[in-house]
Amino acid sequence: MTLRDILAGVPVIAGDAAGDIGIDGIAYNSKAVKPGFLFAALRGAARNGMDFVAEAVAEGAAAVLSSWPKPQSVDVPWVQAADAREALALAAANFYGHPSDQLKVVGVTGTKGKTTVTYLLEEILKAAGFSAGVIGTIEYRRPGARAKAPRTTPESVDLQALLREMLEAGVSHCVMEVSSHALEQKRVWGVSYDVAVFTNLSGEHLDYHPSMEGYFEAKKKLFTLNHKRSASVVNMDDPWGQKLIAELPLKTVTFGFGPAAIVRALSYFMAEDGTDARIAYPGGVLAVRSTLVGRHNVYNILAATAAALALNVPPQAIVEGIAALAGVPGRYEKVPNGRGFQVVVDYAHTDNALEHLLTTARELKPRRVILVFGAGGNRDKDKRERMGRVAARLADWTLLTSDNPRSEEPMDIIAAIEKGFEKEGVRTYEVVPDRREAIARALATANKGDTVLVAGKGHEDYQIFKDRTVPFSDIEVIKGILERMEAA
């Protein structure tokens, strides 16, 4: 493919006349450059891509794309764009032949529930006889292939390559989580969505977005891109969802518990082994059974149902698909044991998610709720006190520990959480900075009928400190401790 072909429809400020040169690939990391590649010199969070142009050229880059003008020292064709990320995304779509145009693509955005909705939709599509691919927080997968996800939504070049790979492998539908970072950085420009889903919005990533309004505006971009979209699917019980509905000029399928919702939960009953719900939609009422628990998961089921209906999936396949999902890694994931208490691992790492987790556990009427959690370092410091207040109100006993402290001191993070307990006027907690020790302490404290919740890391299998990243899975740590307890 020529450079001219790759830049078709891409807004550029200036470019060399060498449009006929061949381009064999695109890279945004100089270490991934091979001879004949177009190298995109992007501004990163810590480094400037311009610092790596010489390295990319030395590796054989045939041309460079950047927001900066061409330096005199560079002797390969140079393409300057006002927004290099947008230009890269559109160029990548051209290079890989716009695979999303030939797939049915569902984009799911929101603060909570994205992962669960994609898992539900995958099972629903499989029940309808389709071949489904998933791109999200836990992994990227399709029938016959899966890989751990380094980020929720891949960089644009990787995303287009993944979509092309799915298409060539026979995938008919791709369901993907679309993060606010990806939307702000225009990684999904050039992707054609058939359905866009909004789950909810609550305080998170406010270390990256300037305000909740800015966070909302980032999410809204999924619904205002020029898509082939047949529908927007929006949670009308969420205040930000209502704001989105009011601003959308396109057809919107609403979901929720309220009588005005197009896809509506009439009732639900929850037990330890799952949830039964009755869902009204324009064609009738669905009686669904799911292994998922909690009111928040009823919303996730509604979102998946509404998206599936927007894709014209038969209602029976929706019922079968919802029932087929055994669970989602790190989302209210139970760890079996023979000691008579429940142990649950969950990804809840915001005050809102922690409240949903604790409320769900309490609905099942345990004897006591024992909570283990911390907060991530270098992330949204304001939520720490709020998380402490939620734990103080809803847990019977809490062990404050480390999450991924990153470059911060673990005790500084814990001290910020403690302020929430102080605001609530209770001291129902203890501080155990070592996460493994905190989990062991919680399990040793638990008695028959109790529920132990280990929150914050969910599916993650690592822990990030200032000077190292170490293997650490809450699930595996819990299993090991329980085995030793039961052997004693």
Image: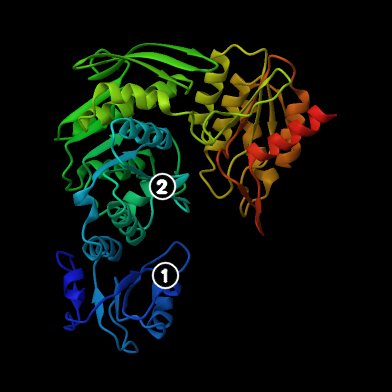
486 relative position to 260: left or right:
right
Residue 233 % position (x, y): 25, 31
Q: Which dot marks residue 29?
A: 1
Badge 2 marks a residue whose secondary structure is strand
Q: Quadrant of the image for the C terminus?
A: top right
406 relative position to 122: left or right:
right
Residue 441 % position (x, y): 77, 31
Badge 1 marks a residue whose secondary structure is loop
CA gap between label 2 and label 1 equals 23 Å
Residue type for callout 1: Asn
Q: Viewer-nearest of labels 2 and 1?
A: 2
Q: Which residue is mark 2?
A: 141
Is 327 or 435 nearer to us in this picture?
A: 327
Q: Quadrant of the image for the N terminus?
A: bottom left
Residue 89 % position (x, y): 27, 60
Decide which of tag 2 and tag 1 comes sooner along the chain: 1
From this viewpoint, is residue 443 visible? yes
